Image: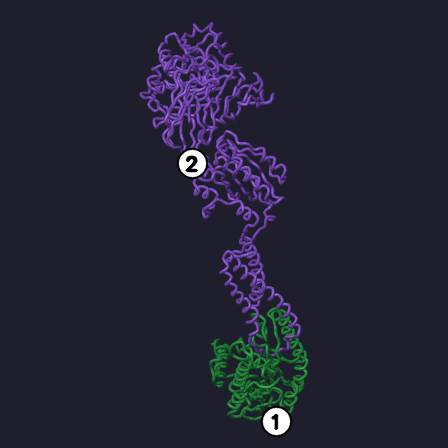
Amino acid sequence: MGFLAPWFLAGLVALGVPVFVHLLRRHRATPRPVSSLMFFERGAQSSTRHRRLRYLLLFALRCALVLLVVLAFANPFVKRTAAELNSRLLLMVLDTSFSMRAGTRFADAKQQALRLLARKPAAQKVEIMGLGGQLDVRTQAINDDTQLRAALESLEPGDGHANFGELGHAIRSLAETVRGPMELHLFSDMQRTAMPANLADAVLPNNVELVLHPVANGAAPGNWTVESVEAPTVLSEPKDPRQSRVRAVVAGFGTPSATKTVSLLVNGKTIATRQVNVPASGRVTVEFAPLDVGYGFNRCEVQIEGRDAFPADDASFFAVRRSDPERVLFVHPADDTRSALYFGSALSAGTKGSFVLQSVTAEQARDLDPSKYAFVVLSDAVMLPPIFERTLRQDVARGGRVLIALGTAAAHHARIPLWDSEVKDARDYARAGGTATVGQVDFSYPALEQAQPGRDNGGWAEVKIFYAAVLEEAGARVAARLADGTPLLLDKQVGEGDVVLLASGLENLTNDLPLHPIFVVFVDRTARYLSGSERLSGSQVVDSFVQLRGVAEPAGAVGSVEVTDPQGHRPLSLSEARTRESFRLERAGFYQIRFANGRDAVIGVNPDRRESDLAAMAQEMQNLWSGSSGSGAPHSAGAEAARVKSRSSSLWWYVMLLLLVVALAEAALASGYLGTQREEA
Amino acid sequence: MQRFLDPNVLAGISSLDLLAKTVVDGFVAGLHRSPDFGFSQEFAEYRPYVPGDDLRHVDWNLFARTERCYLKRYRGETNSQLTVLLDASNSMQYTSGPPTKMDYARYIAASLFYLAIHNQRDAAGLIVFDNEVREYIRPSTRPGQLARLFAGLERAEPQALTDFAKPLKHFQNFLHRRGIVILISDFYEEPETIVRASAPLRFHGNEVVLFHILDPQEVRPVLRGSALLVDLETDRRIEVIPEYAKTTYRTRIDAHIEQLRSRAQTAGMDYQLLLTSQPLDTALREYLSLRQAGN
């Protein structure tokens, strides 16, 4: 036991006050004359002794009061031994992100974790976790060394991106259920890119003490990587240079200027090689054109030749599906020719010939089979032949997709085909002498997706809406709204399929959208979303999810899915294949997927390129995060062991509680005595 | 005029003569009677003439009307004899604030003397005692008697112990005529002893009054913490706690007072408890009522 402020112990001289009051002053009582002691008997003597006992108790309480006040200021603490720390839950988190594959980082981290596990008190409970794309809890809080060691040994580096913000979030959630103190030991390369932009996201609760075990000391080694690849997901015309080309960005992190050889591989064969000069810690773009691939799925790869510090990120995977242009059925009223013109032009420009528009009137659509089209567009076609409408409904239930645009005809026909609600109202802004603008846009919606929308609301700010139908939005996702709150773009799942509804038309009579550049982007993204070609090939980032079946359809009602991972394994069990709605792409490489609607896909999966920047976060930042800004260096193993075995624990709160109790007792005893005096008076 | 009876006010008067005059004049004025006429000038009764009576007191007007000879008697002519026995033991010097019990006793005695001699023309005498008779002034109405009595009171300083038996026995030798005997003391003695010692006074036909002088602190003592008490007479010391003074002591002093009152009344004596904080008229009123009862 010690004192954090021992100088306050000088206050113990104040103990002399109660000693003086109770012992010294009492003996100097002056004799008091009385007429006669006739009525004072010897019995008073024993009573005095009884009172003296009470005075001694009061004296003891007052001494204790002074002593405790002094102790509270002196702030006593005890050195708690490891045995006393058994109640602290030890959280061991091993970074299993992609960057841990570099060098001996993961092996070093695992060794440190095993050493800490060997040192811990036998009774202390430990929870093992892996931090990759998400926090992977390997064990519950147990103290069985064999199980814990096995859990640690089983951890392997993955391809995910570690995010300390997600770690903080997970630990904060854990702290809500585990009230006791916890110690979080993080074994990681402490990558700079793993720290969230806002440090508050990574901050841990008060009852969690963070101990960092960085494994990447010194300057980060130089590393080149294929940062991004821009390639068509569907290729219908290999000879078209606008469409048939691959553009890759090669980036260097902490690298000198160097000449690198970059190759394009298709189905394992190198079909093109380029020499590029990569500036120091800079980027360069490499282009391969044309991309000549065969029909079907092609597994493509852009690769940097020549080894560097982190070879695992020297290649980037993507899949290209070669097919003939897909047909799009465009159904419009007989008197409307503008919408087909605008939509067809935008589709041709946006998709670079991947789609061919077939424009028919509602009457002409009677004998057409919607399943032979990539998707169907109903442009203000609210009066469909019943047989076509039924066929279209069946197609949507099986996975077909439809875009409905509501022109002025919708106001006269309350019932919208395929959309199970009616038009509540029609807002004619032009007749009211004004226009409506697009207010809220959900840029995460696939048809409107923009990574960094501009200040002009992603290009939608200038669009003027003259006419819009108002529909019941229940059960639908509203992707865009007008400034007055009227839903503009809605998406509703019907069976395995999707129905996207634009509450205005596709011509320039109900709005001026076709006259804006955003219309081309909108049509392009909508076409890709509705055709499903986006998700059948191309590339994804590790830990992204793939939708295996429509959520509106009862699980297993259509069929089972099939997933083959890059190692050729099937990660889903038979029951999971019939029930799982989504699948997380955990590994880098090519995934082969058969969806519930029977369509096949090959997807190239790449690690998050933030993992390629191997630079560790600054020491100050590490100190700030772990809350030990005073320490200049990370805890060494020996110091950590000493810290674990012995820890100071302040007794201030206990002293204050005891002080309160003694003060209350003293007040009760003293007031009882004073009460007697008052009564006498 | 009531303030002239307040002991706190009287404590500021050093002259017993003036003090007694102040008290008595204040007291009489409170009775709504003119002090100029006095009780002795008041008609009391007619009494048939018997040989030997002074012819100056015959009511000749009545004789002329009825031819019968009657004497006219006045109250002032029913002379009485007042004897004050003053306890001057050490315990009488106790005080919790002015005046002391001794001073209070002096005020009472002086007032009684003034009232008796100046207003009632009674003979008055004084015996000062502790465990011995220290001073004896024979009852008399002679000129200068009041001054002698006041001087005797001035000389009565507390000393020695209290012993009722010896001085009272000695006092019986001086009593030759019936009258009023007032015993002023704090009576720190067993009631039985006090009554036994003073009862013989009653046998001679005297009206005996016990004036029990106590300080308020002696009746309801207040102790702030345990105290070392010293007996003023014996110098004995004892440590007492407030709780005892609050409970047992009060019970015992109350019992003592009640027992003394009861035994005194049983023996045909009057008893009056006088606290030093009380006005003096209580004592004067007691004297006058006894005097009237005796006529």
Residue beneath disc 2: A197
* Alpha carbons under labels 1 and 2: distance apart: 141 Å
Residue A94 falls left or right of residue A375: right
Q: Chain drawn green, letter?
A: B
For this rendering, which residue is in front, A146 or B250?
A: A146
Report which quarter residue A286 is drawn in: top left
Report which quarter residue B134 is drawn in: bottom right
Chain at numbered mark 1 = B
User: What SS does tag 1 mark?
Assistant: loop
Q: Is residue A356 shown above or below B48?
A: above
Q: Is residue A577 visible?
A: yes
User: What SS does tag 2 mark?
Assistant: loop
Q: Which mark is residue A539?
A: none
For this rendering, which residue is in front, A208 or A162?
A: A162
Q: Amino acid at mark 1?
A: Pro
Residue beneath disc 1: B51
In the rendered image, residues at marks 1 and 2 fall on the same chain: no
